[in-house]
Image (cartoon, grey):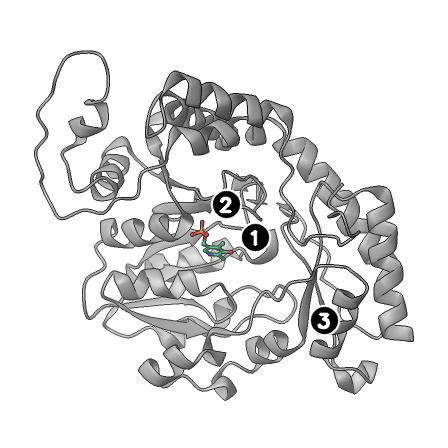
Amino acid sequence: MAERQDNFIVFGAPDIQQAEIDEVVDSMAAGWLGTGPKVKRFEQDFASYQGVPPDCVAALNSCTAALHVSLLAAGVQPGDEVITTAMTFCATANAAIHAGATPVIVDIDPATLNINPDLIEQSITERTRAIVPVHFAGRACEMDAIMAIADKHRLVVVEDCAHAIETEYHGRKAGSFGAYGCFSFYATKNVVTGEGGMVIARSPDATDRIRVLSLHGMSRDAWHRFSDTGYKHYQVVEAGFKYNMMDLQAAIGIHQLRRIEQSWLRRRDIWGQYQAAFQDLPIGIPTEPAENTRHAYHLYTITVDSKDCGMSRDEFLEQMTRAKIGVGVHYLSLAQHPYYVERFGWKTSAYPVANQFGLTTVSLPLSPKLSTDNVRRIIASVRKAILG
Ligand SMILES: *Cc1c(COP(=O)(O)O)cnc(C)c1O
């Protein structure tokens, strides 16, 4: 059940089972709290799920960290520009800022809600270094078009796969197109470790650079100095960060990953039930997944526009909360946040599709933990709120 004592359906409730609890207890009993054997196992399991060599993945403590070190490893430097979508979580833009770059946002395609590839080229300048596409809600970006633009302009692509562990595009996994793919295991994501992230890189050397940047800038061997093969001195080769994953986190992830397909099937089923139940309502519902792609079904987003519903999005949020249903907003467009407006002068009118979506969107619960009854109640409550 994703319900609290008071029948409130929690948005994004993680599905934690006994196997995760036992594994965490095992780590605590063993005394391995920090980066150890379970992180290694989780990396191997994740690599195997993604179909990449085990020495091409690095587990970190968040996707934000993953994006940050990937942009640095990609050669992003102060003064560079990084192109991303106007419709994403702030962490995507903040990672570029922390790498010293200026984020440049591009409007979305109203059907896919992903960065509109037709608008990317006009934002490229001689300072552009990277493109960070975000597979929004788990729907694959148009990677053929994006990679063609990146190749033509010699730009690095870093994929924000925070919603997209299961996503595929034309038979290939999301995260395998760009130089780096960055994943999140935050508490509401498709696979959770509480806080956590992963980078997939294209070569063992590129992955080593990620590891060095993520552990104080200590030379590669530092990652092995915790083993029982004798004391090893470490050398600091650059000023790195403290972004490593703990065994306590990996302990949760190992069992989450074992159920990834089962959870995906459950979310796909709920997503389909919502699609069928809301066809006749005067609201916007998601576009069906594109041919030859696999949707990760991370978010189910509707749009509530007072022009069509006689009710504002915020009134709808209130009504759902009163009906004891946790809802989310993913997201206000980046151009709607004061920090970016002040610093970069972004104007919402320059990103009309993302702006309009940001003002009208609502995410409904899509956790695999939802019971049949929960889903029925959510559907009934949405219909009641909209139809009165
Ligand atoms: C959640 C999220 C992130 C950040 O992930 P963390 O693991 O919480 O750092 C980045 N980008 C997008 C699109 C996200 O949804």
Q: Nearer the viewer, mark 1 or mark 3?
A: 3
User: Label 2: few (<14), some or many (≥20) within 10 Å?
Assistant: many
Q: Is residue 234 above or below residue 97?
A: above
Residue holding disc 3? 317
- Mark 2–mark 3 Cα distance, whole angstroms, equals 32 Å
Q: Residue at x 74, y 80 (%)?
A: 305
Specify the quadrant of the image occupied by residue 243: top left
Local secondary structure at mark 2? loop
Image coordinates of residue 16 in percent, x first then y, are 62, 34
Name the image quarter holding the C terminus: bottom right
Residue holding disc 1? 140
Residue kind at label 1, given as amino acid type: Ala
- Residue 383 vs residue 321: left or right? right
User: Label 1: few (<14), some or many (≥20) within 10 Å?
Assistant: many
Q: Is residue 225 above or below residue 123?
A: above
- Residue 377 vs residue 292: left or right? right
- Mark 2–mark 1 Cα distance, whole angstroms, equals 7 Å
Q: Cβ–Cβ below 8 Å for labels 2 and 1?
A: yes
Q: Residue at x 78, y 47 (%)?
A: 270
Local secondary structure at mark 1? loop
Q: Earlier in the sequence, mark 2 or mark 3?
A: 2
Residue holding disc 2? 174
Looking at the image, which is closer to me, 183 or 140?
A: 183
